[in-house]
Image (cartoon, rainbow, N blue to C red):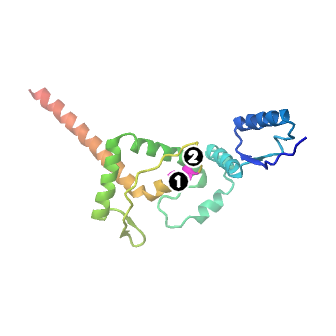
Amino acid sequence: MRILQIGHWTLDNASNNTTFMEELATLLRARDIDFDPIDRRIMCFPHIINICCQHVIADFTNADLAEASTEFVAALPPDLPDRQTFEEAVKRDPVALGRNIVRVLRSSGQRRDLFDDIVQDGNVKGWFQAGTPPEPIQLPLVQLLRDMITRWDTVFYMVRRLREMRPVGQFYFMFQSYLHNLNRLWIISLRSQSTKI
């Protein structure tokens, strides 16, 4: 029996990798090479952490898990105008809300262009402010990011970008609401004009 000079294989938890290791063991045993597919396989630790994070995110709306709610509320600044409890925040499912906002804003080229225009105009005209007292800030000319199940950390990057670009989103939806109301008024005006004719 020959000794295998191959060390260990680091693979994620996908079932096709288990099949690969078993098939490799079969091929090596046929050549009289001792190979234990379980002993020679190392589970990828970052992949395991990612799976755990995905499970936590999937169960994020479970308010029963919010045992630290009093500490959460106590950590908020007392002058925060829209304070909410941890349970209230979790029940709103912030990750799903973020995904929907990104989906809506990235659903067409026109919406992405409008988002860019608001960033550029807001930077030039000083629309975006932060701090106490509020001072104008410059936001980067970037688009919102989607999260993808096949890419690790994308929920984190999506939420971080949403937080960074929050002032733009507020202007965007305010502008969309204004256009929607203007369009409704225009239709009502057209209808009233057609009834007079």
Across and down, in percent, residue 181 comes to 27, 42
Q: Residue at x 32, y 62 (%)?
A: 123
Residue position for label 1 = 157
Across and down, in percent, residue 186 comes to 20, 37
* Left or right for 133, reference 13: left
| In-front residue for pair 81/54 | 54
Between disc 1 and disc 2, the foreground one is: 2
Any part of residue 105 in sight: yes
Which residues are the magenta region? 153-159
Label whose residue precedes the other's in the sequence (1 or 2): 2
Any part of residue 92 in sight: no
- Residue 189 falls within the magenta-colored stretch: no
Res. 151 mark: 2
Q: Quadrant of the C terminus?
A: top left
Vertical side of 55 occupied by 168: above or below: below
* Left or right for 45, reference 92: right
**Quadrant housing residue 74:** bottom right
